[in-house]
Each structure stands twice: as structure tokens, then as C-alpha cells.
Image: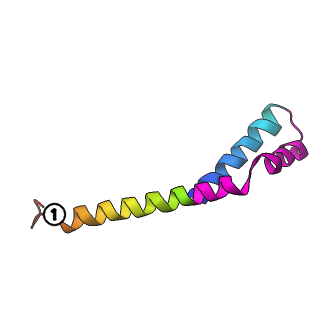
Amino acid sequence: MASIFNVVGIYGGYLVGVKMLGLGPGVYWGEMENLVDLQDVLDGLYKSFSFGIIVTWVCSYKGFFTGYGAEG
């Protein structure tokens, strides 16, 4: 899911930079290549993995300790 939002963000930046501000497409992609490092990508993957584990853990804990019946 995070990768979908990353693609949307990159495309949105492209639209703003190229269509609205008048940058050339080559300039946009060239600077993207220069500024985005492998560590940036890995940090995003680590963060999504961590949040996925935490959310799954909390939801499983809450679901396991619910009450009985409709009230629980």
C-alpha cells in the first residue's frame, strides 16, 4: 500500500514541477535520481514494516481480549 502512495506522490510532484512550474521532464527525473538515495527507500520499507507489525499486534491483542456476545 505504501508503494502505491509513493507512486502517487512522485506523479503528483511530476505534474506540479513539469506542468505547473515549467520544468523539463528530464530535469525532474534527473534530480529525482540525484536526490533519492537507497537509504531513503530502505527507511520507507522499514517504517512500513514496523507499523504493519505494530498495528497487527495491537489489533490481535484487542481482538483476543474482547468480551463475549454482541456487547464484547
The residue singled out by tag 1 in the image is 66
Q: How many marks?
A: 1
43 vs 28, left or right, is left
Residue 34, relative to residue 51: is it above or below?
above
Residue 1 visible at all = no
What is the magenta range?
Answer: 22-45
The reply to whether the magenta stretch includes residue 40 is yes
Whether 55 is drawn above or below 23: the answer is: below
Let me know if residue 72 is in the magenta part.
no
Judging from the image, the colouring scheme is rainbow
**Tag 1's secondary structure?**
loop
Q: In the drawing, does residue 65 fall left or right of residue 8?
A: left
**Amino acid at dot 1:** Thr
Give the x, y percent position of residue 48.
52, 58
Tell me residue 23's x, y (percent). Answer: 86, 36
What secondary structure predominates along the stretch shown in magenta? helix
In the rendered image, the vertical position of residue 18 relative to residue 61, given as above or below? above
Q: Residue furthest front?
A: 39
Quarter occupied by residue 27: top right
Task: Name the quadrant of the C terminus.
Answer: bottom left
Q: Quadrant of the N terminus?
A: bottom right
Q: Is residue 63 visible?
A: yes
Please name whichever residue, 38 or 26, is drawn nearer the observer in this view of the structure: 38
Mark 1 neighbour density, 10 Å: few (under 14) some (14–19) many (20 or more): few
- Residue 61, relative to residue 24: is it above or below? below
Which one is nearer the viewer's eye here, 21 or 27?
Answer: 27
